[in-house]
């Protein structure tokens, strides 16, 4: 494994051990490593709640929290997003209209990701969701 990925995984491990996160199922955290990438799954303690999936490469990090998947440019930024997710500071707002769906994710009330997609639906409304 390349040193940058090993350092990222070490920092992630320190973050998980550094504070009490009662909703993280620590016994079932999965880490899979290869030569040039790693995959980490941090499950929620409640089986019906989504966890966080992290894919780490030499020059990228993908952080997935259902239904969002975000490419984060740097390891430091990825750790900040993961920490915000684990602390429950990320809010996802899903707005459905008759012809499209919009998802907005924010950290501490500041918008950082918006996704719009066509979606033919017969309902209209807004759903808010927090993670961990």
Image (cartoon, rainbow, N blue to C red):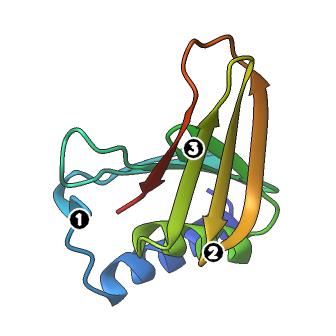
Seen at 68% across and 51% down, the residue is 104
What secondary structure is marked by label 3? loop
| Residue 21 x %, y % | 27, 76
Residue located 78% across and 34% down the image: 116
- Image disc number at residue 34: 3
Rendering coords of residue 81 (x, y %) = 61, 69
Q: Which mark is residue 90?
A: none
Between the C-alphas of marks 2 and 3, the distance is 36 Å
> Quick check: 117 above or below 36?
above
Q: Residue at x 74, y 17 (%)?
A: 99
Q: Which mark is residue 109?
A: 2
Q: Mark 1 sits on what residue?
A: 23
Quadrant that contains the C terminus: bottom left
| Relative depth, front residue between 100 and 84 | 100
Residue 95 in which image quadrant: top right
Q: Earlier in the sequence, mark 3 or mark 1?
A: 1
Q: CA distance from mark 3 to mark 1?
A: 28 Å
Q: Does the image show residue 40?
A: no
Q: What is the quadrant of residue 67 in the picture?
A: top right
Mark 3 near mark 1, Cβ–Cβ under 8 Å? no
Where is 38 relative to 15, above or below? above
Mark toward the viewer: 2 or 3: 2
Q: Nearer the viewer, mark 3 or mark 1?
A: 1
Q: Nearer the viewer, residue 23 or 72?
A: 23
How crowded is the residue under tag 3: few (<14 C-alpha within 10 Å), some, or many (20+)? few
The image shows residue 17, relative to residue 9, as above or below, that is below
Q: Is residue 77 visible?
A: yes
Up-down relation of residue 51 to residue 84 (above or below): above
The local secondary structure at tag 2 comes to loop
Residue 113 vs residue 3, the one in the foreground: 113
């Amino acid at each position: 494994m390349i040193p940058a990925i090993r350092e990222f995984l070490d920092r992630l491990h320190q973050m998980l051990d550094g504070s009490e996160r009662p909703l993280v199922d620590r016994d079932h955290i999965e880490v899979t490593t290869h030569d040039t990438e790693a995959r980490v799954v941090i499950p929620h303690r409640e089986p019906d709640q989504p966890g966080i999936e992290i894919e780490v490469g030499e020059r990228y990090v993908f952080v997935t929290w259902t239904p969002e998947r975000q490419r984060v440019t740097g390891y430091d930024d990825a750790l900040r997003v993961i920490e915000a997710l684990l602390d429950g500071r990320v809010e996802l707002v899903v707005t459905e209209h008759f012809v499209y769906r919009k998802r907005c994710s924010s950290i501490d009330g500041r918008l950082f990701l918006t996704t719009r997609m066509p979606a033919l639906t017969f309902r209209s409304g807004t759903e808010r969701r927090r993670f961990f």
